[in-house]
Image: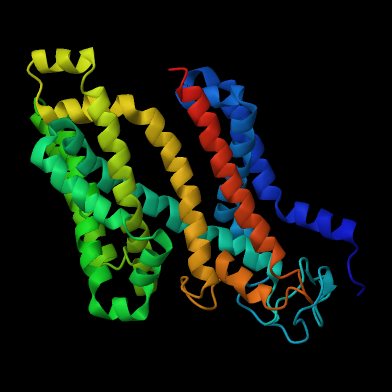
């Protein structure tokens, strides 16, 4: 077999991504048809920047979902004779099979590793950001609403964490020495409680006058929440449904711990401003309780800036995860993590540039998409 030409490589890669193109087309067509009913998301289609960002983000989300169908080889498999082979090189003994983007220094398929690496990023970054928002919102609401000593104490703790350089704090939390002390495990035990607390407060304040619905919702929240909590934080799920690898847990907890203070400060500032509005005073006049006002009057009116920050924060987290992987502190040494793949490829960059460039471009395009999406959402939210 001859090596594929550049046009053949490009055509083959486009074909491998066919599930993504179909998914993109379906999502965009449905979104455009119903954009008037989709609120802020629907208005995003009036912003060229927002559309470009959305397409880039959806591309990588769908790539992560359909990664098993897109890859051409096992991303961990090493095939004899394929070390540092150039893009489009035929695989010996496998008729019709090629390393579309070449092989790395361990004879693994660069294309398949780039595709599968998207799944790692798009599982950790959004999930950890959601947990960070749960922590920041749950603490930021009362701090901004009540003020006083509670605000002073919580703000001091947030500023204490923010006083450390982010990268240095990440390094400290994921190093084996810190891991052996059990500190990440203790942090997970505290931080992973906040989603449960948030939803319990949310349902309790909303459905107090509907006891049947309240009992059902609280029961589901506590049973499912504590079940997930026991498995994710302490690996104590008796059914084995919820589990997090110790190394992944350290990275996940580090992301939540580092991002939570910033989210707290944003929420606190928004609440301090919104609580002076007339509709908050009207809710207080009706006799509504403070937590009801915070969760059902204040928080919905802070959604615009929070949604924008959520997109930006996923981008920051993606960069941080890539940085950790680059310095060998990623999920695992053999994983197709983009940062780790870039680090492995950069050692031979002068001679073999093809192993490092695809994951670097993938990381750049995802972060660019998230930033453009955030800009589009910010632009549209200002029109509310």
- Relative to 328, residue 147 above or below: above
| Location of the C terminus (image quadrant) | top left
Point 60% across, 25% down: residue? 47
Eyeballing the image, is 322 above or below 340? above
Q: Image quarter for residue 35?
A: top right
**Residue 203 percent location from the top left of the image:** 18, 35
* Residue 9 appears left or right of 186: right
Q: Residue furthest front?
A: 163
> Image quadrant for the N terminus?
bottom right
Residue 99 visible in the displayed image: yes
Relative placement, left or right, of 217 versus 300 is left
Hey, which residue is sitting farthest bottom in the picture? 80
Residue at figure coordinates x 71%, y 64% from the top left: 357
Q: Is residue 238 visible?
A: no
Picture coordinates of residue 345 (x, y %)? 67, 73
Q: Measured along the vertical axis of the image, is residue 112 above or below residue 305?
A: below
The correct choice, above or below, for 318 with respect to 96 in the image is: above
Task: Please tell me in which quadrant of the rendered image residue 339 appears.
Answer: bottom right
Q: Where is residue 283 shown, x and y percent of the image?
A: 15, 16
Residue 164 falls left or right of residue 60? left
Q: How is the image coloured?
A: rainbow
Q: Position of residue 376 (x, y in %)?
A: 55, 30
- In the depicted view, which residue is nearer to us: 131 or 273? 273
* Relative to 354, 321 lies left or right: left
Nearer-the-camera pick, 131 or 25: 131
Q: Quadrant of residue 308?
A: top left
Q: Nearer the viewer, residue 228 or 96?
A: 228
- Residue at image position (64%, 63%) is 114
Count of marks placed on residues: 0
- Name the residue located 20 percent from the left edge and 50 percent from the top edge: 156
């Amino acid at each position: 077999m001859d090596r594929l030409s550049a046009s053949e490589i490009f055509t083959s890669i486009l074909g491998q991504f066919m599930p993504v193109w179909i998914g993109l087309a379906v999502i965009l067509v449905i979104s455009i048809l119903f954009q008037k009913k989709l609120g802020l998301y629907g208005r995003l289609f009036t912003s060229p920047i927002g559309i470009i960002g959305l397409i880039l983000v959806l591309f990588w989300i769908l790539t992560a979902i359909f990664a098993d169908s897109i890859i051409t080889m096992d991303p961990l498999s090493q095939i004899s004779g394929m070390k540092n082979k150039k893009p489009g090189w035929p695989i010996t003994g496998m008729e019709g099979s090629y390393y579309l983007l070449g092989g790395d220094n361990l004879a693994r398929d660069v294309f398949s590793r780039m595709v599968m690496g998207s799944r790692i990023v798009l599982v950790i970054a959004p999930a950890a950001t959601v947990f960070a928002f749960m922590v920041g919102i749950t603490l930021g609401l009362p701090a901004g609403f009540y003020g006083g000593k509670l605000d002073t104490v919580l703000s001091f703790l947030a500023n204490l964490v923010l006083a450390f350089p982010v990268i240095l704090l990440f390094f400290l939390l994921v190093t084996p020495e810190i891991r052996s002390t059990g500190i990440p495990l203790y942090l997970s035990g505290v931080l992973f409680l906040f989603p449960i607390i948030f939803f319990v407060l949310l349902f309790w304040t909303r459905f107090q006058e509907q006891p049947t619905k309240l009992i059902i919702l609280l029961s589901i929240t506590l049973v499912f929440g504590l079940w997930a909590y026991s498995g994710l934080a302490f690996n104590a799920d008796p059914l084995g449904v919820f589990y997090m690898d110790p190394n992944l847990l350290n990275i996940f907890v580090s992301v939540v711990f580092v991002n939570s203070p910033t989210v707290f400060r944003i929420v606190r500032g928004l609440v301090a401003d919104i609580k002076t509005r007339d509709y908050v005073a009207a809710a207080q006049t009706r006799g509504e309780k403070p937590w009801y006002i915070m969760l059902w009057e204040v928080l919905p009116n802070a959604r615009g800036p929070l949604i924008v920050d959520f997109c930006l924060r996923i981008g920051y987290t993606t960069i941080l995860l890539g940085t950790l992987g680059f310095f060998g502190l990623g999920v695992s040494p053999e994983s197709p993590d983009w940062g780790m793949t870039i680090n492995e490829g950069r050692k031979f960059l002068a001679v073999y540039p093809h192993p490092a460039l695809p994951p670097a471009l993938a990381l750049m395009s995802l972060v660019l998409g998230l930033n453009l999406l955030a800009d589009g959402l910010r632009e549209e939210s200002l029109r509310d």
